Image (cartoon, helix red, strand yellow):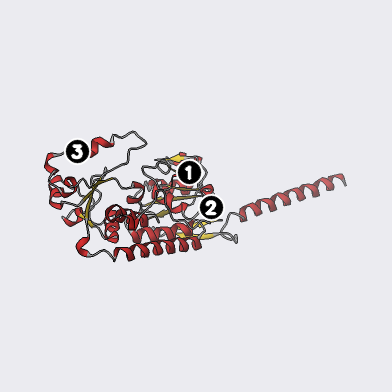
């Protein structure tokens, strides 16, 4: 009798253990009511058991997008530049995420225990399979290069985060802001439109086809580099700069947390005798726009448009620092 007692107790314990394990397993499958599937730009279907609470994205622009969709408490880490006022328009949000990353390895990413990783297609795609082998959901997105890319990526990231309605709200806010800017730009006569050339630390950035070029068009400003045939990815020579003869020069202000001597870079242009006849230098129209805006490839691209218009056309487009769009209440 005692033997049977132990036998049935053992069976009961094993049955209870099985039920617990089955319950745990079912909570992590796509059969859960909270589960959903996301298809990334490579056509991979990524199964999400529930809304992610430890999100990691592999670029500053995708950090900015995600922070327009979720609160900082759902970000396990962000880019090292997100709290740098010379590069970011989300400094305070960046400070609220304690862990900062730059080029993390697969091992470093895994140690953060993310439940969603966003990898832009220009990033290190070799780590995607390795992370998925570890059971970490990875969604590959576009590295946005223009407004359409930005909008499509926001929609994808919203789906990945389990926040599609917030994605729609964020896109609507972008449209409303761009509509407001467009209406003001339409009031500027074509005869009064000005030209600008961006002097970038990325010497092959700023020509036709980049986000800055599109922002100039939306701001009613002529991109001098594009006007003289420079495509994005081509270096603008000083001879071409003289030919462009812009009304304004946008000078760089990024200093890599104070480690870069930005004055040396500026002097290459401002003090060059061959450039002294240019309209921008003769008139002293050498501006330092907010780089957190003008290089922005998130929902805050709209502020890149406004910043360019503000610097060139004045207070009609006045823009305060550290503005950003968010669908997070």
Q: Is residue 226 above or below residue 90?
A: below
How packed mark 3 is, by other alpha carbons closer than 10 Å (few <14, some 14-19, many 20 or more), is few
Q: Nearer the viewer, residue 218 or 74?
A: 218
Question: In this rendering, would 39 be left or right of 204?
Answer: right
**Where's residue 95, x and y in %?**
48, 42
Q: What kind of element bears circle 3?
A: helix
Q: Which mark is residue 52?
A: 2
Q: Compute the Cα span from label 3 to label 2.
A: 48 Å
Of labels 1 and 3, the one closer to you = 3
Q: Of 162 and 252, which appears nearest the observer?
A: 252
Q: Nearer the viewer, mark 2 or mark 1?
A: 1
On the image, the x and y values in percent for residue 128 come to 42, 48
Q: Residue 273 appears in which quarter of the rendering?
A: top left
Q: Nearer the viewer, residue 138 or 130?
A: 138
Task: Count neighbours of disc 2 (C-alpha within 10 A) and say few if under 14, some if 14 to 19, many if 20 or more.
Answer: some
Q: What is the distance, in whole Å, between disc 1 and disc 3 at their CAs? A: 37 Å
Q: Where is mark 1, residue-wise?
A: 77
Residue sitting at x 46%, y 46%: 131
Residue 59 location (% of width, % of height): 39, 47
Drawn side of residue 263 relative to residue 15, left or right: left
Q: Position of residue 236 (x, y in %)?
A: 18, 48
Q: Earlier in the sequence, mark 2 or mark 1?
A: 2
Q: Nearer the viewer, residue 295 or 19?
A: 295
Residue 138 visible in this rendered orientation of the protein:
no
Q: Is residue 57 visible?
A: yes
Q: What kind of element bears circle 1?
A: loop
Crowdedness of circle 1 by 10 Å Cα count: few (<14), some, many (20+)? many
Residue at the extreme right of the image, as rendered: 1
Residue 268 badge = 3
Name the secondary structure under disc 2: loop
Classify 237 as above or below 258.
below
Nearer the camera: disc 3 or disc 2:
3
């Amino acid at each position: 009798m005692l033997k049977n007692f132990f036998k049935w107790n053992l069976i009961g314990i094993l049955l209870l253990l099985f039920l617990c394990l089955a319950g745990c397993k079912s909570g992590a499958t796509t059969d859960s009511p909270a589960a959903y599937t996301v298809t990334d730009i490579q056509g991979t279907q990524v199964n999400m058991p529930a809304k992610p609470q430890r999100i990691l994205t592999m670029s500053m622009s995708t950090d900015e997008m995600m922070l327009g969709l979720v609160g900082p408490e759902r970000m396990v880490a962000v880019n090292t530049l997100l709290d740098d006022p010379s590069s970011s328009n989300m400094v305070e949000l960046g400070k609220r995420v304690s862990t900062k990353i730059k080029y993390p390895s697969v091992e470093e990413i895994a140690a953060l225990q993310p439940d969603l990783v966003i990898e832009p297609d220009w990033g290190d795609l070799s780590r995607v399979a390795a992370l998925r082998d570890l059971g970490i959901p990875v969604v590959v997105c576009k590295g946005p290069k223009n407004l359409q890319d930005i909008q499509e990526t926001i929609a994808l990231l919203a789906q990945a985060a389990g926040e599609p309605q917030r994605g729609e709200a964020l896109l609507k806010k972008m449209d409303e802001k761009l509509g407001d800017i467009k209406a003001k730009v339409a009031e500027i006569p074509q005869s009064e439109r000005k030209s600008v050339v961006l002097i970038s630390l990325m010497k092959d950035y700023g020509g036709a086809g980049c986000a800055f070029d599109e922002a100039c068009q939306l701001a009613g400003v002529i991109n001098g580099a594009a006007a003289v045939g420079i495509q994005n990815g081509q270096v603008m020579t000083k001879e071409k700069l003289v030919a462009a003869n812009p009304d304004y020069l946008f000078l760089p202000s990024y200093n890599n947390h104070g480690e870069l001597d930005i004055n040396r870079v500026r002097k290459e242009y401002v003090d060059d005798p061959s450039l002294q006849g240019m309209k921008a230098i003769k008139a002293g129209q050498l501006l330092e726009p907010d780089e957190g805006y003008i290089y922005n490839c998130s929902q805050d691209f709209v502020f890149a448009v406004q910043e360019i218009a503000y610097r060139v056309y004045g207070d009609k487009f006045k823009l305060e620092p550290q503005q950003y769009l968010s669908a997070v209440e």
